[in-house]
Image (tube, coloured by chain):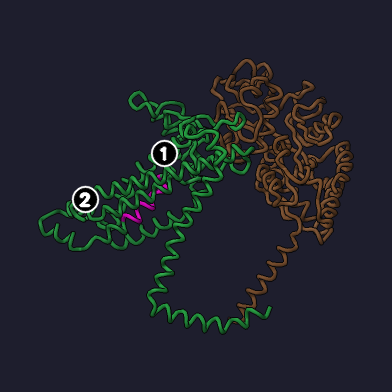
Chain colours: A brown, B green
Amino acid sequence: MKKITTAILALAALAGTSAWAADLNAAGATFPAPIYQKWFQVYKAEHSSVQVNYQSIGSGGGIRQLTSGTVDFGASDAPMTDEQLAAIKGFKVLHFPTVMGAVVPTYNIPGVNAELRFSGSALAAIFLGDIKRWNDARIEKENPGVKLPNAAILVAHRADGSGTTFVWSDYLSKVSPEWKSRVGANTSLNWPVGLGAKGNEGVAGLVKQTPNSIGYVELIYAVQNHMGYGLVQNAGGVYLKADLNGVTAAAAGAAKNMPADFRVSITNAPGKDAYAISTFTWLLIPDTIHDATKRNDIKNFLKWMLTSGQGYCAGLTYAPLPKQVVAKEMKQIDEIH
Amino acid sequence: MSAPASIGVPARKREGVFLQRLKGGDPVAHAIAWLAAASVLLLTVLLVAELWSQSATARHAFGFGFLWSTDWDPNARKFGALPFIYGTLVTSALALLISVPLGVGAAVFLSELARPKVSVVLTFLVELLAAVPSVIFGLLAIFTLVPLVRDVIGPALDKISDVFPFFAGPAYGVGLLTAGIILAVMTFPFVISISREALLAVPREQREAALSLGATKWEATWDAVIPFARLGILGSIFLSLARALGETMAVTMVIGNDPKIASSLLAPGYTIASVIANEFTEATGDLHLSSLILLLLALFLITIVINAGARLLILATTRQGSAK
């Protein structure tokens, strides 16, 4: 009996210490969570005093927790809106792009094995319900030589609020005025047509199961699950199959006009080798951190993340930041005081 | 760290005195039981108060119109509950329509007709079924039920849609019907196991009296046993309804998540619990979040109305009833 009590006490003490050592708390986006966990784990191994406790509760939750001051920093797949920034009292939020991802169209048409090509306007028309059948002239024109069936298109989209949906709809808003006015860009939308499924796996499953369907998933998800996906026409007019180089090129293309606060969408970025539906994901860091230890830990981590940390991207199929962007972010670290 | 060990012995002594007092002391037992009961009330009150205060933004923006508006457009900041209320009620009703006759039938078989060995094994299986997590039912539905509805059941129902217009339209596999069926599967074990308990609790004399009057076994069951167990059976139905109304995961996976009011059961729909699970984490803006919480309040109201209706129904049938 005594032994058990001692064991329980020891366990409790152990749990206690590990909870105290988690001296930085962060919460937010789920999309970059795997690489963030990896970074925090490696960084802790190299600088044993710094443990970051990251909860991947979603971008919206990350922003809310940062606003209410329950976390030291947040993370989001969409930049904060002016309204959200105005709601924060006591400090300003700095956006630090960390890695990049992309969204790809995936489809299931029985008898069609070719990789289909889509222009932005065709994708918007499909998701608006204007293009109703696969053999529509607007799709056939872009895919000469592919025999498309006279079958109704079933659209699959994310039902859960998601950064993936934000990027997808942000892109469609840029290439289609009608999409912009009727639907717009957001993490949850009022979809004109289609079925909703939960998560990348839900959309992928629905597309895989339903003949003549089309949906969209994160590039990482498609690559890791060996899914086929279509080519998307970029702003330079080239039909490009998404890969990590194309995503980094999109960020490099956007780097020239990068606003000082990094709140920028890089969908439909200029450049012939830029993949059109690419995005940054951001860490949201307060510019004023009163605790000197925390401030230094965060600043040192950011420096490490922008240099050595980027080396872990490829292994986890994230696109690393282009060096122009890294250089600009390094300067922004000095604004934290 | 030595503190807990030194408290150990006196604590046990104190516990002994306390237990003694409890054994002899009705007032103490009364107080403890009262506290336990009060905590239920307190929890409910806190829940409603929290939902009420958190949904203030949406209540002020939409008022009662929220309940019958069909808009759900986070970008335009327009929110309405009707498609979700519709989806929740339709799927739950479908579920009960399927699971109640099957479940009560199975319970009658298990308690009245089956041999004891068969009954024990089947009852064990039913209880096992009740313990399966909902996400597993959802996955099963995606891999088996969804293709079945899309390729077999849906097209078959579409053929009779001239007579039954609510079976019209293309079958995607996911939709209200599929969600209703999976909810039926999930509520089925509840109906069986509670109804069976109620039937088993019927006194032997009830059966023997009917049999001695010359009733067949089935007549005795139908006329003497089932009416006697009516309250328990009704209880099982309302518990199942509660589960169906609030079920989230399995429904989200198969309902199609489209907030539109469709006349066809093969069309996709959306339920209150599903939209909250889907959109809560990434809700942008206070109004969106507040509207989701207002939806919760609506679900709470629906549950209260249905439960109150159930009570009234029980009261009414008990007065007219013969057995109790």
Percent across and percent down for residue B248 are 50, 45
Percent across and percent down for residue B220 are 17, 54
In front: B284, or B210? Answer: B284
Q: Is residue A140 above or below residue A46?
A: above
Residue displayed at 83% across by 57% down: A293
- Is residue B146 left or right of A298 when viewed as pictured? left
* Residue B188 within the magenta-colored segment of the rendering: yes
Q: Amino acid at mark 2?
A: Arg
Residue displayed at 50% across by 39% down: B254
Q: Categorize mark 1 by other alpha carbons within 10 Å: few (<14), some (14-19), many (20+).
A: some
Asked where in the image residue B157 lies, by quadrant, the reply is top left
The residue carrying mark 1 is B89
Q: Amino acid at mark 1?
A: Leu
Subunit of label 2: B
What are the residue bounds of the magenta stretch? B184-195
The residue carrying mark 2 is B319
Q: Categorize mark 2 by other alpha carbons within 10 Å: few (<14), some (14-19), many (20+).
A: few
- The span from disc 2 to disc 1 (Cα, nearest Å) is 29 Å
Q: Is residue B252 above or below residue B231?
A: above
Percent across and percent down for residue B170 are 46, 27
* Residue B190 within the magenta-colored segment of the rendering: yes
Which structural element holds mark 1? helix
Subunit of label 1: B
Which structural element holds mark 2? helix
Asked where in the image residue A91 lies, by quadrant, the reply is top right
- Is residue A161 left or right of B135 when viewed as pictured? right
Q: Earlier in the sequence, mark 2 or mark 1?
A: 1
Q: Quadrant of the N terminus of chain A?
A: bottom right
Residue B253 in view (yes/no): no
Residue displayed at 81% across by 45% down: A287
Residue B247 in view (yes/no): yes
